Image (cartoon, grey):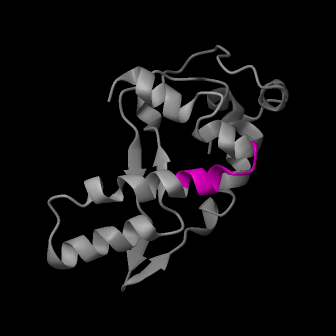
């Protein structure tokens, strides 16, 4: 996907990260995944398709950037006061949160499915709050 499209979806003032600041990030994330699910399931059949679909329906399913695609820059691209304040206080996640990386890939990651049920990682329960506070999770 062209990097400006990723930028609009992820970093723009009406993009996914902005929605987390407004408290509607989870719903926006869910709406985007629901819209993209049919395309994600192309090529899957039978039990594999059922598992993939269940995974994409999971509460921990998310759109995200690959951390390895995000350059290690000492810059501020998104001048959002709460994130800048966290950066000034030395919050590690805010270093990435103030960046607006120009990448060509948005990953869609489903929830973890174990024995037909979603397994939710307790370390990721506060993902929405981290996005709101720091711009990155």
- At a point 44% along the width and 69% down the height, the residue shown is 57
Q: Where the C terminus falls, by quadrant? A: top right
Judging depth in this view, the residue of 47 and 85 nearest the camera is 47
| Residue 77 spot, x, y in % from top left | 64, 17
Q: Is residue 36 left or right of residue 125?
A: left
| Residue 36 spot, x, y in % from top left | 36, 52
Q: In this view, does 67 lie to the left or right of 2?
A: right
- 76 is higher (above) or lower (below) than 122: above
Q: Is residue 98 left or right of residue 107?
A: right
Q: Residue furthest bottom?
A: 115
Q: Is residue 25 magenta?
A: yes
Q: Where the N terminus falls, by quadrant? A: top left
| Residue 133 spot, x, y in % from top left | 77, 42
| Residue 52 spot, x, y in % from top left | 30, 68
Judging depth in this view, the residue of 48 and 12 nearest the camera is 12
Q: What stretch is highlighted in magenta?
A: 22-29
Q: In which quarter of the image is residue 47?
A: bottom left
Q: Residue furthest top?
A: 75
Count of numbered badges drawn on the protein: 0
Q: Does the magenta stretch include residue 73?
A: no
Q: In which quarter of the image is residue 125?
A: bottom right
- At a point 17% along the width and 65% down the height, the residue shown is 44
Dominant SS in magenta: helix
- At a point 83% along the width and 32% down the height, the residue shown is 82
């Amino acid at each position: 996907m062209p990097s400006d499209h990723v930028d609009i979806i992820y970093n723009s003032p009406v993009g996914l990260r902005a929605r987390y600041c407004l408290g509607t990030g989870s719903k926006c994330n869910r709406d985007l995944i629901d819209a993209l699910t049919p395309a994600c399931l192309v090529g899957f059949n039978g039990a594999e398709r059922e598992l993939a679909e269940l995974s994409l329906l999971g509460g921990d399913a998310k759109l995200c950037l690959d951390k390895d695609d995000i350059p290690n820059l000492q810059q501020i691209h998104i001048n959002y006061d709460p994130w800048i304040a966290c950066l000034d206080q030395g919050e590690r996640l805010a270093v990435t949160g103030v960046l607006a990386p120009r990448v060509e890939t948005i990953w869609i990651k489903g929830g973890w499915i174990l024995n037909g049920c979603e397994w939710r990682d307790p370390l990721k329960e506060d993902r929405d709050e981290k996005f709101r506070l720091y711009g990155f999770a």
